[in-house]
Amino acid sequence: MVWAAGVAGAIVGVGTLHPLTMAIYWFEFHPASGSFATVWEFMTFRLRAGFTPGMLVMTGVFATIGLVHGLATGWVIRALTLANLAVGQLQAELARTTASLLASPEGETLEFKSSARWDYREGKTSRAIEQAVSRTIAGFMNHRGGSLLIGVDDTGHPVGLRNDFDSLRRHDRDGFQQFLVGLVEKDLGADCCPLVHVLFQAIDGHDVCRVVVEASPRPVYVRDDRAARYLVRAGNSTRELDTRAAVEHIAAHWPHAR
């Protein structure tokens, strides 16, 4: 889109701005000239004059001017298109109610987790549980967004967040939200934080956290002590891609990614 706009701008610069400038220049120095029977005859004459060998440098200048303006216009249009698409996706996701999500099976845009850091088997907090949350969020960002419900078992039954709350310095929703935002910043990067929206709802006497995740405008990696890992949402699970698959997915999902 951007380069197509640039080429169109260059064509306009050469085919319109250049002969128009030539016409203005002619009238400035030949105000009383009546040697042309029609305006069209005059314009075609000046157009031909504009593409003579002696005017190649000027033609190149107008082509460059048109190219720059076209690229700038194309970039703005692309940015606005992507922004509108992101807003539309977020609005569609927020339109889904938590109750309807609990009644739905896990899928490409929905995941259930019983906790964000509390290991029920070990009876203590676990970094592995935290990383599982980060991996799911990254998978949504690298796909098309979605909702992560925390405090819900695999069957969609609310189990609450009390153990997670009690493991934090602040034993409430605010403390949990701060923890989640800090986790995203730590594992995915600070620029990913605005793509995460944390909502709470009490269901059957249990606090449930809904993390609404927007699709990312760039590839997102989960960072750990050993490597940066690239994950995508596939079906009802989050998959880590190897280098080749990651490169292919990024090229297809973000054609202009660097």
Image: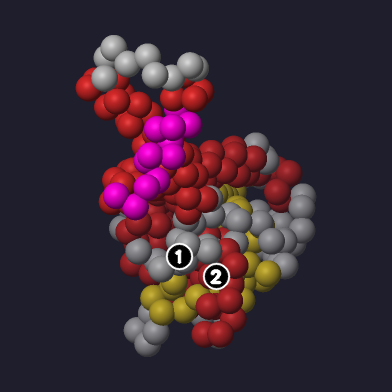
Using the image, determine if residue 257 lies above or below residue 30: below
Q: Position of residue 243 (x, y in %)?
A: 52, 85
Q: Specify few, some or many for label 1: CA neighbours under 10 Å numbering under 14, 14-19, or 20 or more.
A: few
Q: Residue at left 39%, top 76%?
A: 223
Q: In the image, which disc is placed on residue 257?
A: 1
Q: CA distance from mark 1 to mark 2?
A: 7 Å
Q: Residue at left 29%, top 25%?
A: 26
Q: In the image, which disc is placed on residue 191?
A: none
Disc 1 on helix, strand or loop? loop
> Which of the two discs, 1 and 2, labels the residue nearer the N terminus?
2
Q: Nearer the viewer, residue 16 or 186?
A: 16
Residue type, numbered disc 1: Ala
Disc 2 on helix, strand or loop? helix
Using the image, determine if residue 167 lies above or below residue 91: below
Q: Is residue 239 visible?
A: yes
Give the left or right position of residue 172, taking residue 30 as reference.
Answer: right
Q: Position of residue 40 (x, y in %)?
A: 51, 23
State which quadrant residue 107 falls in: bottom right
Q: Which residues are magenta?
A: 43-54
Name the residue at the left extreme: 29
Q: Is residue 57 magenta?
A: no
Q: Is residue 49 magenta?
A: yes
